Image (tube, grey):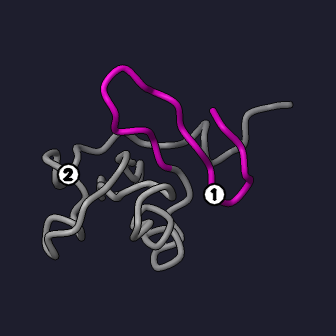
């Protein structure tokens, strides 16, 4: 399977909140794993986290690609094409 257009054209913006999930930090909530939006740098929590802010960010903005923001991980995920890169 060829890499989707969104993954192949994804940018590499700086993380807006490198210390954690932007929304969880604001509300005092917790997260399991972090994901960084490759369009704007938003850092959100994963779908195993109570608030699922990375997925909510996609639904609010339609920014298609996230990347793991966990140490030692570099995988990326396209929400639009349901494809990992």
The structure residue drawn at horizontal position 16% and vertical position 45%, both measured from the top left corner, is 18
Q: Quadrant of the C terminus?
A: top right
Q: Which residue is mark 2?
A: 20
Position of residue 73 in the picture relative to residue 78 (left or right): left
The structure residue drawn at horizontal position 34% and vertical position 58%, both measured from the top left corner, is 44
Give coordinates of residue 71: x percent, y percent: 30, 26
Splitting the image into 4 quarters, where does residue 84 fall?
top right
Splitting the image into 4 quarters, where does residue 67 fall?
top left
Q: Quadrant of the N terminus?
A: top right
Give coordinates of residue 37: x percent, y percent: 40, 53
Position of residue 29 in the picture relative to residue 4 (left or right): left
The structure residue drawn at horizontal position 39% and vertical position 70%, both measured from the top left corner, is 51
Splitting the image into 4 quarters, where does residue 43 fall?
bottom left
Q: Nearer the viewer, residue 42 or 5?
A: 42
Instruction: Tell me if residue 28 comes above or below residue 48 in the rendering.
Output: below
Q: CA distance from mark 1 to mark 2?
A: 21 Å
73 in the magenta segment = yes
Indicate the secondary structure of the residue bearing disc 1.
loop
| Magenta segment boundaries in residue numbering | 66-85
Labels 1 and 2: the sequence-earlier one: 2
Q: Which mark is residue 27?
A: none
Instruction: Tell me if residue 51 comes above or below residue 45 in the rendering.
Output: below
């Amino acid at each position: 399977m060829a890499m989707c257009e969104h993954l192949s054209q994804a940018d590499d913006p700086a993380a807006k909140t490198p210390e954690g999930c932007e929304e969880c930090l604001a509300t005092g909530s917790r997260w399991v794993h972090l994901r960084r939006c490759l369009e704007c740098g938003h850092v959100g929590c994963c779908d195993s986290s109570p608030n699922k802010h990375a997925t909510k960010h996609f639904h609010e903005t339609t920014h298609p690609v996230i990347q793991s923001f966990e140490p030692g991980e570099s995988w990326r995920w396209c929400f639009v094409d349901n494809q990992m890169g």
